[in-house]
Image: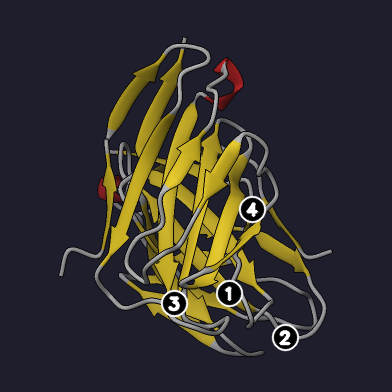
Amino acid sequence: NAGVTQTPKFQVLKTGQSMTLQCAQDMNHEYMSWYRQDPGMGLRLIHYSVGAGITDQGEVPNGYNVSRSTTEDFPLRLLSAAPSQTSVYFCASSGTGSSYGYTFGSGTRLTVV
Amino acid sequence: GNSVTQMEGPVTLSEEAFLTINCTYTATGYPSLFWYVQYPGEGLQLLLKATKADDKGSNKGFEATYRKETTSFHLEKGSVQVSDSAVYFCALSGDSNTGKLIFGQGTTLQVKP
């Protein structure tokens, strides 16, 4: 199994550009999440989804949109990139409930100049 | 709200030394507790978990016991190797409807030969 696949692995954007970070999982997981990782701040939840058609905001949602049209895919859209969005982004998926634990993708390193 | 506090790093040990990384949490109810490991340039991997009080999670020589009386989930390993050098994250999931993870700040472990 591929697990959680994120693309691209690296991306450089100019301020004001938009882009979509792709995330796909092949484990039939209902729960999916996007996190950003910044030095000294751990991982912070951006958006999450508990199933197709259902999304909600996490801790730091501003500047990002998500949608979940299928169980497998959970893309993250940056509407107008800002230097503050320079970060490493991780997508993760999990079975239902609080005891399953999330499986993480390998990350996308985004630089906004 | 729910939160996780980890000991600050970096932690530097010699090979074969004993490792403890402290983790305490604040949560209502009975959360599930996790340790994740992140090797350089990679995503997070689930290392071990415990889902109820007094449970012991173990994997690859690492252990952690869910202590509700002290709200702790300390990570231990009897003899570390250079290959254990990584960042370790403690996390909790207290919401079974979403499975959302709340992470500690992460602790960097460096093991020297």
Dot 3: few (<14), some (14–19), or many (≥20) neighbours within 10 Å?
Answer: some
Q: Position of residue A6 (x, y in %)?
A: 29, 48
Q: Amino acid at mark 3?
A: Glu
Viewer-side label of 4, 3: 3
Question: Mark 3, chain letter?
Answer: A
- How far separated are the C-alphas under marks 2 and 4? 18 Å
As shown in the figure, which amino acid type bears the numbered disc 1? Gly
Residue mark closest to the camera, 1 vs 2: 1
Q: Nearer the viewer, residue A17 or A28?
A: A17
For label 2, the crowd category at 10 Å Cα-Cα, with few meaning under 14, some 14 to 19 and many 20 or more, is: some
Q: Secondary structure at mark 2?
A: loop
* Measured Cα–Cα span from mark 4 to mark 1: 16 Å
Q: Is residue A59 left or right of residue A90?
A: right
Residue position marked by numbered label 4 in the rendering? B104
What amino acid is found at the position of numbered circle 4 in the picture? Answer: Gly
Residue drawn where x is 29% and y is 28% of the image: A10
Q: Which mark is residue B30?
A: 2
Q: Are marks 3 and 1 in contact (CB under 8 Å)?
A: no
Please state which of residues A1 and A101 is positioned toward the viewer in this rendering: A1
Name the residue tied to disc 3. Answer: A30
SS at mark 3? loop
The residue wearing badge 1 is B99
Residue found at x 35% / y 37%: A108
Bin the neighbour count of mark 4 within 10 Å (Cα to Cα): few under 14, some 14-19, many 20 and up: many
Label 4 lies in what chain?
B
Q: Are marks 1 and 2 on the same chain?
A: yes
Q: Earlier in the sequence, mark 1 or mark 2?
A: 2
Q: In screen coordinates, is B93 left or right of A74? A: right
The x, y position of residue A18, in whole percent, is 45, 26
* Disc nearer the start of the sequence (2/4): 2
Q: Nearer the viewer, residue A74 or A9?
A: A74
